[in-house]
Image (cartoon, rainbow, N blue to C red):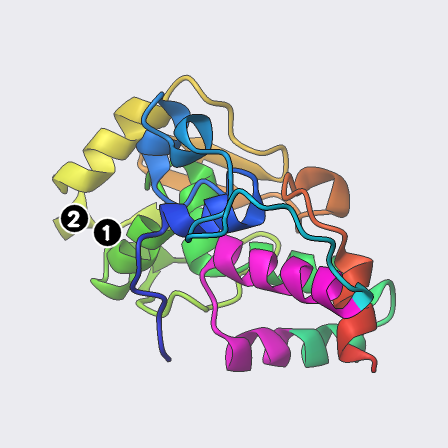
Amino acid sequence: MSRYKDEQCRICRREGQKLFLKGERCYTDKCSINRRNYAPGQNGQKKSKLSEYGTQLREKQKTKSFYGVGEKQFRKYFDMASKNKGKTGEILLQLLESRLDNVVYRLGFATSRTQARMLVTHGAFDVNGKKVNIPSYIIKEGDVISVREIKKDNGAIKHAIEVNSARPAPTWLERDFEKLSGKVVRLAGREDIDLPVEEHLIVELYSK
């Protein structure tokens, strides 16, 4: 799957809000949104009104960037969500929240989703006692995610725990930094997801 390889701060500036793509940097004065709160490019400071389609597209692009998924994979999640009972937009966000890389980030074992994706790919975590190195692996209620024994001295994980020790875990997760593990108490609901996105616009876009 292709990945966005340009400066990640440009994504936040284009969306006009923090998407926390660079971990610690996003909480400091070095954050680009704090320094240059306008879109990148020569005409970035000019404000233009988006069309209905443009508004819907921006919501989709913002959500893709937030979770670090490509178009093909994002469409797959939407198709999965549309086949389930309930609000398609909310189920879509729940599926994205249930990705293993996102859960690792939410538990505080990584400072960003990008770092979490890298750690998962390098085999740093077990799910229910079995090694899983697929970032898009969908976790379920009751699953236990733990740092593998051979990775417990990983510097990136130790640093992430130090950084995140003062930040509470989401209410749908339980974590134990001493045991380097966490548990999915329940699947995330819409009220648990802090992404400032209007998911109904994504549904409208794909429904055309």
Q: Are marks 2 and 1 in contact (CB under 8 Å)?
A: yes
Instruction: Give the x, y percent position of residue 88.
Output: 81, 67
> Does 52 sit left or right of 136 as displayed?
right
Q: Is residue 8 left or right of residue 12?
A: left
Secondary structure under badge 1? Answer: loop
The dot on residue 110 is none
The answer to whether 151 is drawn above or below residue 159 in the figure is below
Residue 59 among those drawn in magenta:
yes
Q: Which residues are magenta?
A: 53-77
Residue topped by disc 2: 151
Specify the label residue 148 is tagged with.
Answer: 1
Indicate the quadrant where residue 83 lies.
bottom right
Rate crowding at label 1 as few (under 14), some (14 to 19) or many (20 or more) other CA atoms within 10 Å: some
Q: Residue at x 61, y 80 (%)?
A: 76
SS for tag 2? helix
Cα distance, mark 2 to mark 1? 5 Å
